[in-house]
Image (tube, rainbow, N blue to C red):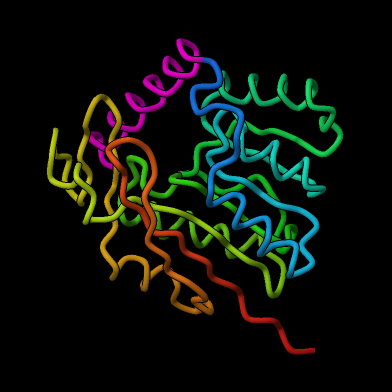
Amino acid sequence: MSDDGQDLAEAQRAHWQSAYGDHPGMYGRQPSAPAVHAAAVFRAAGVRDVLELGAGHGRDTLYFAREGFTVQATDFSATGLKQLRAGARQQGVAGRVTTVVHDVRAPLPLPDASVDAVFAHMLLCMALSTEEIHAAVGEVRRVLRSGGIFVYTVRHTGDAHYGAGIPHGDDIFEHGGFAVHFFGRAMVDALADGWRLDEVQPFEEGDLPRRLWRVTQTLPRERA
């Protein structure tokens, strides 16, 4: 990572820590629409355990746990994960939830082929370079079991904030203190290389509204 990239990463870490500290449970208690969709996909595929990347304060983690999945939740905000653990205790699902403070730029702290599914709502479109995004998806591939499913969402270049705010290069723009890497379709296709790309579904979220893709891709099953 360049010095500029490192500085941006540290600034974003501090910004998210402050955001979760100043606004506990800032995204509410209800799960995101992509999490509801992912749970249905996971259940149909017989998934038992889910790794959630960028879990924040855990609205989707807790939903997965309530739906009966075992969930490992990661985020680089210790403040957000503290709120997640408190929510798990309050909702009676603490036994199905574990948390790890982790920066997605680093290798995942999990063994190879150790989870059935991975979920990441808007994590890959944070202030990550293209190289870092490819490395993160490589780590997802490493920790998924044969036939594992990856559901992720990203803001795309049709979003109203694309090209607005402070430019950081590599299609990253900072608006309101939050830096976003906006995806073109070529990026989605490149990240699916070697996978089965099951779905690229456009949707909107929030008041702007944010414009996103929901992507589902599956690892090929290894032949015996």
Q: Position of residue 103 (x, y in %)?
A: 50, 37
Residue 84 belongs to magenta span? no
Q: Is residue 15 depicted above or below 150 in this figure? A: above
Which residue ends up furthest to the front in the rendered image?
207
Q: Is residue 107 left or right of residue 207?
A: right
Magenta residues, as a range?
A: 1-23
Give me the residue at 70% from left, 52% from top. 50
Report the side of 163 relative to 179 (left or right).
left
Would you say residue 6 sits in the magenta stretch? yes
The one nearer the camera, 11 or 189, is: 189
Residue at 53%, 39% (x, y): give it: 54
136 or 155, which is in the foreground?
A: 155
- In the rendered image, residue 140, in percent from the top left (x then y), is placed at 57, 58
Camera-side residue of 121 and 223: 121
In the picture, which quadrant includes the N terminus? top left
Rendering coords of residue 198 (x, y %): 52, 76
x then y, percent, for residue 204: 36, 50
**Magenta stretch, overall SS:** helix
When the figure is inspected, residue 77 is found, relative to residue 186, above or below; the finding is above
